[in-house]
Amino acid sequence: MTVDQAAQTTATSQEGEQATPDALDSLGRWTLRPGVSVTVLPHGVHLRGWITSVTLEGGAGLPVLWGRLAEALAGDGGAELARAAVAGSPLRAALVTVIGQLHDHDLLVERPAGKKGDAAGENGDAAGQWLGAVADRPAEAAAALIRSRVRVLAARPDGPLARAAARALDRAGIRAATGEAADLPDGQVLLVAAGPGAPSPLSVEQDAQERAVVVGLRPGVGFVTPVGSARQARADADGLADRLRRREALGEAEHPGLPALLASSAAQRLVCAVAGLRDPSAEAGDARLIPGLPAALVAEREPLRGEYRTWAGPVLVDADRVRPRADVRTLAEALARIPVLTDRLAGVLDEPDPGALPQLPAALVRSSVAGEVLVSGSARADLARLEAVCRAAELLLGKGDGGPVVGAGAVHARGRALRRAAAGAAVRQQGARSGETAGPFSGAASVPWSPEPGRHPQALHWWSVLVRRLGVDADVAVSGLDTGGGAVFHAEVRGRTAGGGTAVEASADNAVAFAALSAVVRVQAAADAPHARHLVTPSGASTSLARPEATAPWEDAGWTTAWLAESAAREPGLQEALTALTGWSPQPWEPPADAHADVRALWSALRQCGFSVLSARPRHRTHSTLTEGSR
């Protein structure tokens, strides 16, 4: 809608109504932000602010109207303009529309109580102009900076990094005191701001108004921690320094711009926190940063650049960092958090990557776990990546096969854990049926299955891929497991010429589909990644995340999206039946007291990203050289 159209609509709606105060009446409270650039167009005007912009289009008179409005914003606040534009007139409606757009795009700031323009920074120094350009209330922000007491602490206060931080704070209008902190590691500088009367930044009891960041510089790389208490900032600094140690470039000359980049970024984060401005990491609108999680700036020398990265640190001190995070609920949320866990600089896991592995008929990805190759496969690459991350975390947390179960949220983790336990129960029931074992199981009932018309399209598809496309000579055995209630089926594909696969699902067709898909993954992995030490095969546990909000009218059960939606609908009942079958319910898992620091760091990162870690029953190894994950 153009300004002319908006004016006509507003004018029509106001005919016959009593005039009420509008944006033009209150214009005296506002002025244009410092730094807003204006470009007059033939039939409109374009305005560009700090991080927003807007183009207003209308008739040939709109540039003239803008000129009158700009004069009012810079002068008397629109009193004369308000008298000239009578209530209900198209002129007043057009002015109200333009003013509304300026507010919507944050291009106006409240006028100062004193001399016109000073609080907005029009007549002040560079720091005042910056506050006027970005702060909602520049005068209050400036007052907060004046009241704060800032110290720059380092083991070597005269070092280049500490001096650069002090200079950056001075340019922002803050006179910082530099001091020595012998317990700070070399190459780290603590910037801490406290309000009047607050305790020392190095005392145990920290004031609620304390804000601190640590800037660290190592050979070829550096960082700026998120804003927090001094204790939290120092804990983050230790964690970042440890993660970045493998990226250090020893023995090479340092880039002269790296200390300045880091110090100025640290000063900016601290100033924004003290002044009540949003953190610089939020300004760029980077979709890779996870809402609710802190971001650390990581800078590299070659090429010289700094980038904010979501930081899931190993030590949580501040209340906003300790509070529990919401579980992942959708596949999109899980996939957004995988880059946090696998970040090449600040992550805790290796990133799963397809590389040169085939993506058809099944999609394969590979990653590294403690120097060993892990391969994961599924119907889609995104599902394969998710399963690879979960299995890699399990191997590192448990240092082998007997560790906990990891999932993207409690439902996914519970489905993975129960299926793994149910696979053992299926073996025992089948043994009870044949008289080989005794136990609490009454036995499994054999369910005949053959690839005939009428079977589920996905079961027929993956069976056909296995025996026809890949040429595997195989058969399948399906058993209905006795749960005393809900339906649970176990399918085992046995390949005479290649490896097979197993699955535990809510229907016979679903069990066959996942077992055949697992066999396909195994055959592809054997051909294309023969040196893989760990293999992760798919299961229906991930369907609870991958269920689409809606499917297209043409997507029948033969489409993967529709199949996942069907399986997801059965997942709650299946998990109840598996709990009854196994007589066991997985519980939250935490590292033992004597766990290695890397284990605790990984567990903490998973929880901060909304992943769940549950207890699991140890299971025996089924292959001498290849371990399997989710089945």
Image: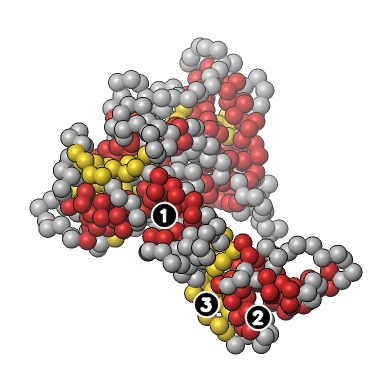
Mark closer to the chain start, 3 or 2: 3
Mark 1: give few (<14), some (14-19) or many (20+) Cα within 10 Å.
some
Q: Residue at x 62, y 50 (%)?
A: 548
Q: Position of residue 426 (x, y in %)?
A: 52, 25
* Kind of residue indicated by mark 2: Leu
Q: In this rendering, is residue 62 above or below 357?
A: below
Q: Secondary structure at mark 2?
A: helix
Q: Using the numbered discs, state the Cα–Cα distance from disc 3 to disc 2 in whole angstroms.
A: 14 Å
Q: Using the numbered discs, state the Cα–Cα distance from disc 1 to disc 3 in whole angstroms.
A: 25 Å
Left or right: 282 in relation to 342: right
Left or right: 289 in relation to 113: left
Residue 27 in view, yes or no = yes
Q: In this rendering, is residue 556 above or below 104?
A: above
Q: Residue furthest right?
A: 16
Mark closer to the chain start, 1 or 3: 3
Q: Badge 1 is on which residue? A: 280
Q: Residue furthest front?
A: 115
Q: How many marks?
A: 3
Q: Residue at x 87, y 66 (%)?
A: 17
Mark 1 or 3, closer to the camera: 3
Residue 65 has which mark?
2
Quadrant position of residue 25: bottom right
Q: Position of residue 577 (x, y in %)?
A: 62, 25
Q: Are marks 2 and 1 in contact (CB under 8 Å)?
A: no
Q: Badge 3 is on which residue? A: 38
Q: Position of residue 34 (x, y in %)?
A: 48, 67
Mark closer to the chain start, 2 or 1: 2
* Kind of residue indicated by mark 3: Val
Camera-nearest residue between 192 and 504? 192
Residue 105 in view, yes or no = no
Q: Are marks 1 and 3 in contact (CB under 8 Å)?
A: no
Q: Residue at x 18, y 44 (%)?
A: 157
